[in-house]
Image (spheres, rainbow, N blue to C red):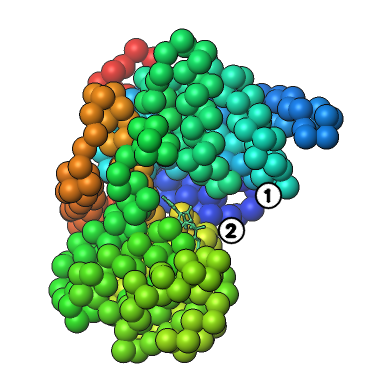
Amino acid sequence: MSYIEPAPIKDKDNPLESMMQRFDKAVDLLGISEEMYYILKVPRKQVTVGLPVTMDSGEIRTFEGYRVIHSTILGPSKGGIRFDPDVNLDEVRALAAWMTWKCAVVDIPYGGAKGGVACNPREMSPGEIERLMRAYTTALLDVFGPDQDIPAPDMGTGPREMAWLMDEYSKSKGMTIPAVVTGKPLVLGGSLGRTEATGRGVMVSALAGMEKLRINPYRATAAVQGFGNVGSHAALLLRERGTAIHAISDISGAYYNDKGIDVADAIAYRDANKGSLEGYVKAELISGDDLFTLPVDVLVPAAKEDVITRKNVSSIQARMIVEGANGPTSAKADDIINEKGIMVVPDILANAGGVTVSYFEWVQNRIGYKWTLERINRRTDRIMKDAFDKVYETSLKYKVSLRIAAYIVAIDKVASTYKYRGGF
Ligand code: NAD
């Protein structure tokens, strides 16, 4: 079965292309018809907008922005907005599909979407970014909506930009509508627990995997690549559950201590050191590549895509990989990982804690009530654990890796919803 449209991503080693390859494999195993294959693959809507913005110099610059709605069959579409010079329609299309599968795997009632503007926010003033965000919102007023399409932050955007989006959208409707966007500041209806949600989901996935492999978390060891939002929270929460963190890393290098790193101390050091672990002396400095080869039980890639490849996969000693980052493992490494018997909890499952708490933010906005952190954590844990169990059972049923099982769960859910709704 092959895709008749031009392939959205040209580079075969690209993480998004890797995602498409796994999608194809799962579709084949499920025996999905060719008609359904194209229904699932082709986005429902893709919008390109030109955004003239007055810069501080008085010059008017026109930016190109995109919003792709991959699917709305399970509910309104959900996905972040990326501000980055490399943003293009092909990338946004693939990322939108990725969101569909992620939401379906954790069984939250959303379709997938993604948006972006080709711009360099690092070279723009706050005023210029605000005018760009407001222009993007205005251009997409008929696309966004709490029951239609709900954006969120992604690379290059954060709570500040989501506040501007909410304000612009609300003004256009003549009323305050917080549920149009998630990832807002707390005072505007953001949710407790959102900051640590992705790391929390990684921790829950890691513990669920350890249970299957009969690894006692109190005797287990882990190495975590990336010490930003996802990596540092995952490391802290795993440590709190007894697992010794033998190595952490960021862009400055990797830090190793076979007695275990005091994660709270490392976070405090990073926060006092302009966000970097550089110069952290309570652990030995090793290379970022060496972190992957350590004899630990659990490896958590939580930095960037395509870090586990055919080149380094043979030297991995961990028994389990829990993917905090999106697309950290290339499709070509999958077979070797499976041969080595390493369990991989895949990105679309392991890092779905973030979108789960975004969903909770939307629910709270809609009912006009704030949940406690305790309730949010409890519900996140349950959703993550249920999703893990379902994927695990599917992997046994089809005799496939957890990664392919996660795609099977997601694709089956979306495809069967189409069948029930009918009306093509
Ligand atoms: P972040 O910017 O907060 O942190 C990234 C960390 O990775 C930093 O510590 C950085 O120094 C480090 N890093 C970058 N390049 C590195 C390298 N070559 N070697 C070692 N460390 C390196 O980002 P984040 O929000 O933690 O996101 C990390 C990954 O998780 C990304 O793939 C992101 O798409 C994915 N993700 C994030 C969320 C979320 O809620 N933040 C949700 C789902 C997926």
Residue 333 point in image, percent of width and height: 47, 67
Amino acid carrying label 1: it is Arg
Residue 160 in sight in this render: yes
List the residue tagged with mark 1.
Answer: 122
Residue 256 point in image, percent of width and height: 42, 85
Q: Is residue 73 left or right of residue 378?
A: right
Which residue: 35% across, 32% down? 189
Residue 176's disc number: none
Amino acid carrying label 2: it is Asp
Q: Residue 30 or 268: which is nearer the viewer?
A: 268
Q: Residue 339 or 383: which is nearer the viewer?
A: 383
Decide if ligand 1 comes within 8 Å of the CB at mark 1.
no
Q: Is residue 160 above or below residue 19?
A: above
Residue 13's disc number: 2
Extreme top residue here? 174
Circles 1 and 2: CB distance less than 8 Å? no
Q: Is residue 38 above or below residue 300?
A: above
Which residue: 33% across, 25% down? 75
Structural distance between the alpha carbons of marks 1 and 2 = 28 Å
Comparing labels 1 and 2, the label whose residue is closer to the camera:
1
Crowdedness near tag 2: few (<14), some (14–19) or many (≥20) residues, C-alpha within 10 Å: some
Q: State the quadrant of the C terminus.
A: top left
**Quarter-of-image position of residue 185:** top left
Which residue: 64% across, 24% down? 135
Residue 393 point in image, percent of width and height: 18, 53
Residue 123 point in image, percent of width and height: 73, 47
Q: Is residue 206 left or right of residue 231?
A: left
Callout 1: helix, strand or loop?
helix
